[in-house]
Image (cartoon, rainbow, N blue to C red):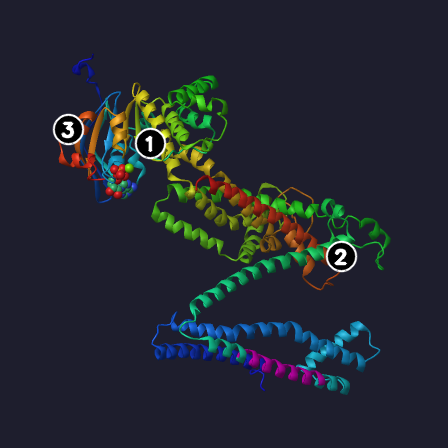
Amino acid sequence: MSDFLSPNLVVFAATIAAAFLSFYLGTGRVRKQAIASQTKSHSLNQYYGFYVSLWVLVPAILLALIWMFAADPMLTSAAKARMLAAYPNLPDSFLNLKMAQLVNIAAGYIKAPDAVMAAQADLLRAAQASADRARSLTLAAVMCIGFFYAFRRVSPELRARVLCEAFLRRLFFLSAVVAILTTIGIVASLLFEAVRFFREVSLFDFFFGTHWSPMTALRPGDAAAADEFVAGSTGSFGMVPVMAGTLLVAVIAMAVAVPIGLFSAIYTSEFASRRVRNIVKPTLEVLAGVPTVVYGFFAALTAAPFFRDLGLFVGLDVSSQSALAAGGVMGIMIIPFISSLSDDVITAVPQSLRDGAYGLGSTRGETIIRVVLPAAFPGLVGAFLLAISRAIGETMIVVMAAGVAANMTINPLESVTTVTVQIVMLLTGDNEFDSVKTLSAFALGMTLFVITLLLNVAALTASRRLGQRYE
Amino acid sequence: MDTVVDMAKAIKIQAKDVNVFYGEKQALNNVSIDIEDRSVTAFIGPSGCGKSTFLRCFNRMNDVIPSCRVKGSIMMGDVDVNSPQTDPVLLRARIGMVFQKPNPFPKTIFENVAYGPRIHGLAQSKTELDDMVEDSLKKAGLWGEVADRLADQATGLSGGQQQRLCIARAIAVGPDVLLMDEPCSALDPIATSVIEELISELQQRFTILIVTHSMQQAARVSQKTAYFHLGTLVEYGDTKDVFTLPKNEQTEAYISGKIG
Ligand SMILES: Nc1ncnc2c1ncn2[C@@H]1O[C@H](COP(=O)(O)OP(=O)(O)O)[C@@H](O)[C@H]1O
Ligand SMILES: [Mg+2]
């Protein structure tokens, strides 16, 4: 069989074809029966088609999934047992390498280096082929059973529409469950690695340590540890400077984004005519669609040199990678986010409150400042909190413009590093995935996750309070 | 007993040939009316006939609606309401307004009432402001219920209390005229009767224009009644005459429940 027509592809195509065929047969059967018995069928004909093809497809998909999770590991472990027999004295790590090689040989990607491996590869190929055959046969059997079960039940009295509806409901429910489970899975894996990290480094050192230099961190007991390194290494995983850098950049970003975003929201919601609003709002939202890496270019190539030159001009020493440049550009990125959310919040303030204020003789400005904004306040706080959590989690801009030095500073002209930058640094390049260094990235990620989660919950609560008041 | 001549009151507001348009659509057609000082005038009529629109002409609230144009003259004393020289902000300080749905600001009870005096700089000191708030709440018949919780959120009050708070808030600015647009339509019968009594009391100090869809309410609280139909003022006269001997057959049909 050619590469293109892999057995999987053929099985897949056959399954789809079977589904179409059963749709056709199902509709045909109900149509004929309805004519023969002179009755009107309960549902539209197409529902009977769907009903039959669902009975063909769903069991087949379930079976394929089970096969994927159960059969393939069985094949692999059988092959491994054979390999162990063929190479009895090989250490475990070496055997794993050989296994990877074997899989590639069996797939035809590489040539077998020797006769033993070639024989093993043949065995594996044969096992795979028979497994594939078995799978195709069971699939065909399951589809046939499903088909005949459903096909025989098709009659004008069958409430196919209701059954299809029930299936859809379960499908939607399942999708929701999958989404939730994925989230839980991601958090769990993060938590798992973070716990491994905290077995090596104490919680206190991590959260309150003021020195961050994971690259040179050597723990007592490391074979290569020179004495002076050991002495200076205890504080190497202190996240305070990294957190400080993150907060500094976020604060700068908010200082840029909140006034501009809020004021433009006030303009679009309170002053702009409908025509202007219909132009300004979508334009701002386009700004939200610019990929963050583009903002990163802008920060690194335009903003950072600009701030450095400006600093030179007024006699200040601005680092070429400054918190100011990163934060400023991040602020620009967040503007549309804040302005769009704030606009929604301000527009949601009932007109009756504005009327009340005007009726008492307020000017437009007084109405906005004394009535509309206070009424919108909880929602605005919610919008700002969401924006902060965006800023803290933002990666690309800071990677390109903030720098990597974990300086303990609140001076915006210096280079700082952030949690996200450190995670990128720690996990890119050649790394063993179980060194303390890489594990620390998960601890950072976990911390970041908890912080943004809390911010989002706070934001949600704040905007709920606004919603309740004006239902 | 007072004679009829003694009871005739001074004219507070004089509207002449008022026409209002929403875009191309005409909502009011040549409405002219004389409003008596310190009395209650009720605007009645089927819904959509322009009562609210007319009421909003008196304090230029129609300015807020971009599509709305008002023509004609409304004189309040020597103030020409519609003149470009008249500042609607100052005008609205002289003409308070109470809306259909109670709309207290999401602030404390005290801050709601203090709002007007604050923006118009009416109080020179904190004590003066306190006095103004207390006085307004008393006039609105709410003081007894809220005296010990002025710092509570106004949105926590009941609907009827909120509406009286809105009246207090309007009174606090010191207007001569109060405009009320169906002030009881969102309230239960008990709260409604409390507000109706309040209106009768306020009448001694204020000229009150009230839109109502309840004819019983108009009969109970007003001295004068104006009946509107499709943007025109059909009948205007003493309330007891309009309700007992309507001159116009449309008015009669409405009052006897044939139009509604
Ligand atoms: N903001 C507006 N824009 C356009 N038309 C309006 C507006 N407000 C009221 N109208 C129209 O003006 C007419 C009178 O409305 P309104 O004064 O609210 O009537 P009423 O208070 O007597 O029920 C109605 O036909 C209504 O549709
Ligand atoms: Mg109305």
Residue at 39% x, 41% y is A270
Both marks 3 and 2 on one chain: no
Quarter of the image containing the C terminus of chain B? top left
Rendered view: A402 above or below A103: above
Whether the magenta-drawn stretch holds residue A130 is answered as yes
Residue at figure coordinates x 69%, y 55% from the top left? A191
Disc on the earlier residue, 3 or 1:
1
Report if the CB atoms under discs 2 and 1 are less than 8 Å apart. no
Q: Give amino acid for label 3.
A: Leu
Residue B200 image position (x, y, % from top left): 30, 22
Nearer the observer, disc 3 or disc 1?
3
Check whether the beta carbons of the residues at disc 3 and disc 1 lie within 8 A of each other: no
Q: Amino acid at mark 1?
A: Pro
Range shown magenta:
A123-143
Disc 3 element: loop
* Disc 2 from disc 1: Cα separation: 71 Å
Residue carrying label 2 = A436
Q: Residue furthest top?
A: B1
Secondary structure beneath dot 1 equals loop
| In-image side of B133 versus A207 (left or right) | left
Name which residue type carries label 2: Val
The answer to whether A236 appears left or right of A394 in the picture is right
* Chain name for mark 3: B
On the image, numbered disc 1 is attached to which residue?
B183
Label 3 with label 2: CB-CB less than 8 Å: no
Dot 2 falls on which chain?
A
Looking at the picture, tell me which residue is in the foreground, B189 or B10.
B189
Question: Can the viewer see residue A371 in this picture?
Answer: yes
Q: Which residue position is annotated with label 3? A: B245
Q: Secondary structure at mark 2?
A: helix
Estimate the spatial distance between the alpha carbons at disc 3 and disc 2, rounded to whole Å.
96 Å
